[in-house]
Image: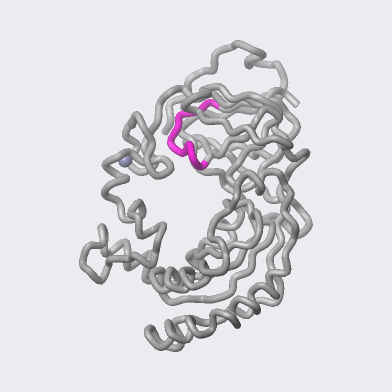
Amino acid sequence: MDQLIPLARSGGGYLPGEGRHDRAQGPLRKLDIRLPAAGHPAEYTLRAGDQRVGLNAWLGRRIVLRHTGEIHCIECGRATRKSFGQGHCYPCFSSLAHCDLCMMRPETCHYFQGSCRDPAWGERHCFRPHTVYLANASGLKVGITRGTNMPTRWLDQGAIQALPILDVETRQQSGFVETLFKAQVSDRTNWRAMLKGEVEPLDLVAERDRLLASLEPGLGELRRRFGHDAIQAVDAAAPLSIDYPVLEWPRKIVSFNFDKTPRIEGTLMGLKGQYLILDTGVVNLRKFAGYQVAVSAEAA
Ligand SMILES: [Zn+2]
């Protein structure tokens, strides 16, 4: 359980009976984003320790996020002066399997060399079906994800469209497939473009058909190596479209960082990917996982 510390009563601070005044305090976790009912924007929940705040209801309100200076490893809870790999202490970052470089570059999986940091973990997480997808967060991109991590992965990236295209037997094999695609498609999101909301919808089905046709020789080679059933086309007729709750897009992107600006304040104008969009700047909450933060919104 996180310790609850009363907020300083400065700058319009909370007084009992002052009306509705939402707040939470604890080490941040990445935003919990849910796919809404059809026709509704994505639903955002801020998580600080074991406290949760529905952020869609905070849109248009003035909010304050104050970092206390403490960072707690999201894995073991120990205090750390610096965060490694989105919220880990250095001992966890340098020893846990899910912090290894092969998570970012699955084609470099070294399980078969006997050097996996945690073979049992690898068997549970990497030797499982993965999906290669196309998404549109700031233009066309390719990515891979565990089958169970859709659509979370796309929501985290701020994708406005996503289309699963290939089911692959293991994480490493999906990395080989992604490497083929990377010759023709980016695997990155331009977060500034994503946050400006200037992203044009794409015909992902046409892009898929074009890419699968042109990459057929490489895919055939991988099937000969890993078995015909190791890589299978996903039968998806249309991409998933995702709307985000945004009142107004920022014209210029100013990016906040709790290390330099412990107190971030502004009117909440939108939520996209793992970002809060304030009228004063944007902040990527995933980057600050483990940071002890007190969050509050002015009464509506
Ligand atoms: Zn740790």
For the record, the magenta segment spans 286-294
Where is residue 236? Give x, y as percent. 65, 76
Q: In which quarter of the image is residue 90?
A: top left
Q: Quadrant of residue 163?
A: bottom right
Which of 46 and 200 lies nearest the eye of the viewer?
A: 200
> What is the x, y in percent for residue 129?
45, 73
Q: Please, is residue 227 above or below residue 172 in the view? A: below
Q: Dividing the image into 4 quarters, which one contains the C terminus? A: top right
Above or below residue 153? Residue 17 is: above
In the image, 241 versus 35, the foreground residue is 241
- Please tell me whether residue 55 is drawn above or below residue 6 in the rendered image: below
Seen in the image, is 98 located left or right of residue 157? left
Viewer-side residue, 15 vs 136:
136
Residue in view at x 77 percent, y 39 percent: 247
Q: Residue at x 46, y 69 (%)?
A: 179
In the rendered image, residue 262, in percent from the top left (x then y), is placed at 51, 23
Q: In this view, does 236 lie to the left or right of 131?
A: right
Quick one: quadrant of the N terminus?
top left
Q: In this view, does 95 lie to the left or right of 2?
A: left
Q: In the orientation shown, which residue stands out farthest toward the left?
A: 114
Q: Which residue lies furthest to the front in this view?
A: 183
| The furthest residue to the top | 10
Rendered location of residue 248, percent (x, y) = 77, 38
Q: In which quarter of the image is ligand 1?
A: top left
Q: Which residue is drawn at 22% across and 69% down?
A: 113
Q: How is the image coloured?
A: one colour
Q: Is residue 73 magenta?
A: no
Which residue shows up at 75% across the image and 32% down it? 60
Q: Does the magenta stretch include residue 289?
A: yes
Total numbered labels: 0
Q: Residue 269 falls in which quadrant of the image?
A: top right
Nearest the camera: 246 or 13?
A: 246
